[in-house]
Amino acid sequence: MPSTEPSASPVGPRTAGDARPVLGHVNLMVDTLIANTNLEDLRAIVRGMLATSPPSVAQAFTSAARQRLLRVDATAIPDTTGIFVAGEGDKTAAPTEKLHNILIRIRTLYGSGLGFASLRILTRVISATVRLRWEDDSEMEDVLANIDADISQAIQSSKEELDGGRVADLQGAREVVQELRSAVHESQIDVRKWDGAFPFERAASSLEFWRI
């Protein structure tokens, strides 16, 4: 059912402070649907449309997503202080809600094809784990395993970004990869000091043979 709250209605006049673009090319009823559909239903609609459409539609979708993310400066490196808490005892490090929000941004970036931008942020996340300690089978270990998977997917996204000819600054891309390698290596050395399980094995393996 459409929302009955006034703020959800797209029919009223747009003001100078309205950050939404004017959707002159979108049917009014479609615009109303987009503005009022809850997030879960909107996701299902988009997935269904992309799954049943030619590949060109998915390409147009991710292209529009990249344009939007670049326009709102989503590629800027966020403040990563406080994304983990060390805890009061030994091996008590834990993730915070701030980390969760940053990971959402990272996944949005590499999912839309901005792989190198996501790797730049992931490098900061990895560096933030140095000198922390955590227990096996803890929430921290689970989160780091997910981050390891994120790195692998971001690397794949970066390779597709290169193959698609969408990397304007090749030297900058090389620097991003080198910074990532350094962060992963530093983490590996640090974890060995306290006999922990290195959390970024997949990332290290993916980086070993990647040359730009």
Image (spheres, rainbow, N blue to C red):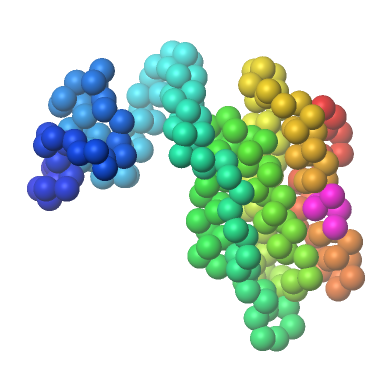
Q: Is residue 31 above or below residue 73?
A: above
Left or right: 181, with 30 as reference point? right
Res 159 quadrant in image: top right
Residue 79 in view: yes
| Magenta-drawn stretch, dominant element (helix, strand or loop) | helix
Q: Residue 82, position in %: x, y?
A: 60, 68
Q: Which residues are magenta?
A: 182-186
Q: Position of residue 109 (x, y in %)?
A: 55, 38
Q: Residue 207, relative to residue 123: is it above or below?
A: above
Tell how many labels: 0
Q: Is 46 situated above or below 121?
A: above
Say if the magenta span includes residue 19. no
| Relative depth, front residue between 138 and 114 | 114
User: Residue 32 occupies which quadrant of the picture?
Assistant: top left
Tell me residue 174's x, y (percent).
80, 33
Looking at the figure, which quarter contains the C terminus? top right
Relative image position of residue 59 (x, y in whole percent): 49, 19
Q: Residue furthest bottom?
A: 89
User: What residue is rendered at 62% in x and 60% in y?
Assistant: 80
Q: Residue at 86%, 53% (x, y): give it.
A: 185
Q: Say whether residue 160 is visible.
A: no
- Point 23% across, 21% down: residue: 24
In the picture, which quadrant includes the N terminus? top left
* Residue nearest the observer in this picture, 42 or 29: 29
